Amino acid sequence: MTVVVCGEAMLLMLAEPGIPLERATAFRRSVAGAESNVAAGLARLGHDARWIGRLGADPAGRSVLAMLRADGIDTRHAVVDPDAPTGLLVRDSHPSRAIDVQYYRAGSAASRLAPDELSPEMLDGARVVHVTGITPMLSDSAHRATLRLFDLAREVGALVSFDPNIRLKLGAPEEWRERVAPLLGRADVVLAGEDELELLGVDAAALGGLVVVKRRDKSATLGELRQEAFPVPMVDPVGAGDAFAAGFLSGLLRGEPYEICLREAAAVAALVVQCVGDTEGLPDRAGLDRALAGFAEAGETVHR
């Protein structure tokens, strides 16, 4: 196993493109979850990926597990809770207006994640463990479980990749600063938005490890390297950050130079935003190579 992710996976009901949520009558079923999105992206790019998390013993949970397994994600350590439901996310999609997102996750199986459910065996063989700030914000027990996950990753010698992925519906800014900000200093790889670092009160230059900053202008920087966003038509912006993480971690796992990691991250994100849904646009290796070749015709976009 090369990558282990731990976090929430929900059933996504996605309204027909362009129709406001309150007016939508047709919905498409899919999966939503920051960590599971990254696992799907890495699995399609040829990496072994394992998802650790909790789902309800309900049709939604069975559907999510089936979709994760269809992408080749190892779900053997998933916990099925008979007493709590699978979380639900309902949203619309539009290229040029705010997305309306409704979460139904209070009391969900995912929010019951607890530290004693995590064991070193779950991380066996992992080179990278990826988690986001959403997981510790789900509940007190999920916060403690995230801290244990960091400890276990250290024990097995895996790198910890962390994306704050701030969602203010889960808590006020001060709560995010209390729970999530300290985790950035414990991670080996940080993938954070410029605005997220500002909200958390964290200086990227003061962090150790690799720190990739996603800028407001859609570029990304790592030290002196800058990767511009590829100019593509945007259909649905949701999932771009998770796609970026998958592309970057894929390059890192293959030992590519950082400029290649950034370029592949931007390319995967560019492919995802051209499709409706969080994961529908995630490419396989051949698809990513074709996209990179096409983008190369526009000239080099990494600047030192």
Image (cartoon, rainbow, N blue to C red):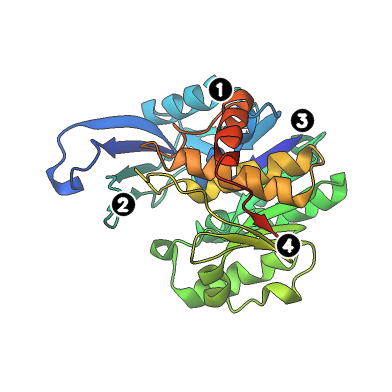
What SS does tag 3 mark? loop
On residue 101, the disc is: 2
Q: Residue at x 61, y 46 (%)?
A: 265
Relative to 16, does residue 71 appear above or below in the rendering?
above
**Left or right, residue 304 beside residue 80:** right
Distance between mark 1 and mark 4 Cα atoms: 40 Å
Distance between mark 2 and mark 1 Cα atoms: 26 Å
Distance between mark 2 and mark 4 Cα atoms: 38 Å
Going by the numbered disc 2, the residue's amino acid type is: Val
Which numbered disc, 2 or 3, marks the residue that appears first in the sequence? 3
- Circle 3 sits on which residue? 1
Going by the numbered disc 4, the residue's amino acid type is: Arg
Distance between mark 2 and mark 3 Cα atoms: 33 Å
- Circle 4 sits on which residue? 304
Q: Which residue is at the front of the view, 172 or 243?
A: 243
| Residues marked 4 and 3 touching at CB (< 8 Å) | no
Outermost left residue: 23
- Circle 1 sits on which residue? 69
Q: Disc 4 or disc 3, which is closer to the eye?
A: 4
Going by the numbered disc 1, the residue's amino acid type is: Arg
On the question of residue 116 being in view, the answer is: no
Q: Residues within 10 Å of mark 1 (few under 14, many from 20)?
A: some
Which numbered disc, 4 or 3, marks the residue that appears first in the sequence? 3
Q: Give the image quarter of residue 127.
A: top right
Residue 242 place in picture, x, y as percent: 54, 46
